[in-house]
Every structure is written in structure tokens, then in C-alpha cells.
Amino acid sequence: MPRQRKDGTKAAAPNRRKLSEIFLQRAKPKKDRAYAVWDSYQRGLCVLIQPSGHKAWKVVYGHHGRPRWYHIGDVAAIGLSDARKIAGKIMVQAADGKDPLAERRAERSRGTFQELATRYLEEYAKKNNKSWAQSDALVRRHLLKKWGHLMAADVRREDVDAMMNRIESPSVANLTLASASAIFSWGMTKSIIAVNPCSLIERKKVSARERVLSESEIPRVWKALGADEIRGAALRFLLLVGQRPGEVSAMRWEFLKDGWLEMPGSPVPEMNWKGTKNNFSHRVWIPAPAKKILDQMAGGKKPTTGHVFPGARGPFVDNLDKVMRAVSDELGIERVVPHDMRRTHGTTITRLRFGRDAMNRIQNHREGGIASIYDQHGYSDENKQIMESVAAEIVRLVEGGPAESNVVAIGGRTR
């Protein structure tokens, strides 16, 4: 009996008959749609006839309650008797719980760039590369569509050159090249391929980014960020504390201690924390305006675990760059990226005459060494005053208050 369609009407009964060579020669296409004729002799076998007149053998079997359509080949190339034999073998495999279609797809992907990229991601990148997600996104967006079906060993320098020319952004092109090179280099270490086609490919020239928000832009951008409750709050917080965008996005309530944000340098996988960029644990004071944002995110509660800025689709907020792009377009200003907020904070530190050393210390720019360990709490009082002064200056600009003296006294000294 034919099944009932979703709209409640009855589906047409399957077109079933004992197929023959004469029927296959005489079967006519339908102008409006493709249709299948099922073989009553071999279960699961049908011939699918397209409006163009093209005829192909298909085997349909069930796997986990869903139909799977396995393509055998063109009727013009494979005869009826051979098609029945192939269909019989596939149906036997399906009866044994196997999935012949999935197995064929896996077989076809062996040795391809897609397989190599997948192995690299699962066996190496996720375990050793903090920025694996960003690299994987670049690979999926710019490489798999063109290279995924190619044998990894068949990707040539000209393919890499073509990829570099396709990508308009120099920085994105260079990052994609680096991601591809890492995959091929890993493949060489595993003796999967012999050559890295990315070697000696010239990187695109990238101008050092120096964008900071002007005093007139800060209040406009701050106001526009209010349209996105969580991501806007994360970006405002970033402007007030000056830390790296990825670290602000992934920060957790556990990292807030006695008014300080204490970020572990090493990854904490169970917390979805990748560690700081330079692997140094970092401690930064949270100024009063930034604490107000935390209070808003807490919603009247006192959370002790979880991400401060939760994401809609992931554990924490993402796509901050997308928000900044929309804000830039809305305001009609030069493109602003999340890192420009951090750069604006650092520039404000030096503009208020606290000095470059203070900026590097607060923004976790370190050369390392034993001194960094002993200085972890050595500048607590000074850092507090710097953070509060910078945040107060940003709030003054946002609220349009009168300019104050930018000469700040610290510990009896004047800067």
C-alpha cells in the first residue's frame, strides 16, 4: 500500500514491473519530473529516468530507518543482468547492517586533501594548536571546495597560487596559506605525502594595522554596540580592560577574584579555555565601569561558574568581528575590528602619560623570564589606578563630560 504524504494525500503506488532490455530501450521520459521504475525481480533495484532521457541504475536500501540511494551507473554502460547482480550484493550488505553508500564515499575520500585535513585536525591540531578553530574555518571556506576531492599528493603550486589570488584580503590569504602549509607539513611527517606545495609561496604584503578610535568615534561606537546585548557588552568590556578579544570572549566567572580578572596562561580544556596567547598567566584589575557590565551579565545573580559572555550557538560569544563590521557600516566610519578596541585602550594608557611599560604590563605583552613571575603582583596598586583612570577617560568621552588634566600622579610621582 502506498504511503501517505505529509500533506495527508496518498502517494502514488510504486511503478513496479519485471524489467527487461526491451522495456529499458522503449521507456520514455516525463517532461515535468524524473521517475523511477522498480524491478519486481530484484528487490531494491530501480531505473531512474530523468526528463532529459538519461537512465541510471539505483539501489535503494534502508539504514537506521532511512532510505539510502546507491548509484550503480548508467543503463547504457551496465546491462540489466549485471545491475541485478550488483544490487543483490548491496542488499546483502545492507541486511548485515552495513552501509555500502557510506563505505564507498569513505573509500573515495582516502588519500584526498579533505581526508588529510581531517586527520590533521583530529590527530594533531586540536591537541596542539590553540587557534585550530580559526584555521579549520579558513580551510573549510577557502580550500575544501576547490581541493577537497583532489588527491593530497596532486595539489600543485599552481593550485596554491590560484588560491592566493582568489582571496582578496592579504591577511586572510596569508593565514589560509599558513593553515594549508601546516596540513601538508604534518602529512610529510606521517609519510602521507612527499612534498609541501605551499613551500616558497610568496606571502602577500600586509600593512601594519594602526587603527584606533578617535575621541569623537568612541561615544558613537559605544552607543551603537548597545544593539547587540551580549556581543555588544563583550566589546564594551574589551574597550574598558584592553585585553585580547578571544580572551575576553572566553573569560569565565571563575577567573574573577577580589576585583581582578586572573586568566590562566595554560589551556583548561574542561572550561573551553585555550590559555592566553603568550602562555603567561595574567592578572588585570577590573575598573568600576567594567564591573557594571559584569553586573548586567550576572542579571542580579552571583554566578561562580560558566562563561561571562555566553554564546547562542557555542559555549561563549563569537562573531565579534561581524558586529564591529556592522557598526562601522552603520556609522559610516573606517572599518573597526575588535583588536582596534584593545589598541585604543593601550593608546589611552600612553596618552594619559602612564608610559609604554605600563601599557605592555597591563595588556600582557611580555618577553618572559623569571622577572615576569616575581612581578605578578608587584604593580597592583599602580595597575589599579591606571585601569580606573583609563576607564574613567573612556566613560568621560562616552558621556561627553569636560576634559580633565591628563597628568596623573602615582605613588607621589607625576607622569
Image (tube, rainbow, N blue to C red):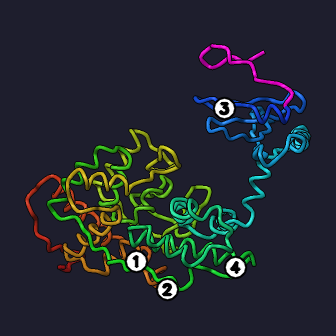
Of the residues under marks 3 and 1, which one precedes in the sequence? 3
Please tell me which residue is depicted at 25% across the width and 61% down the height of the picture.
Answer: 391
Label 2, on which residue?
369
Mark 3: amino acid: Pro
* Mark 3, secondary structure of its residue: loop
Tell me the magenta residue range.
1-19
The reply, left or right, for residue 253 in relation to residue 23 is left
Instruction: Mark 2 vs mark 1: give the one in front.
Output: 1
Residue 292: x, y in percent? 31, 49
Could you tell me if the residues under marks 2 and 1 are in contact, i.e. CB atoms within 8 Å?
Answer: no
> Cα distance, mark 3 to mark 2?
77 Å
Of the residues under marks 1 and 4, which one precedes in the sequence? 4
Instruction: Mark 4 vs mark 2: give the one in front.
Output: 4
- Nearest the camera: 363 or 185? 185
> Cα distance, mark 4 to mark 2?
35 Å
Please tell me which residue is depicted at 25% across the width and 80% down the height of the picture.
Answer: 355
Mark 4: amino acid: Met
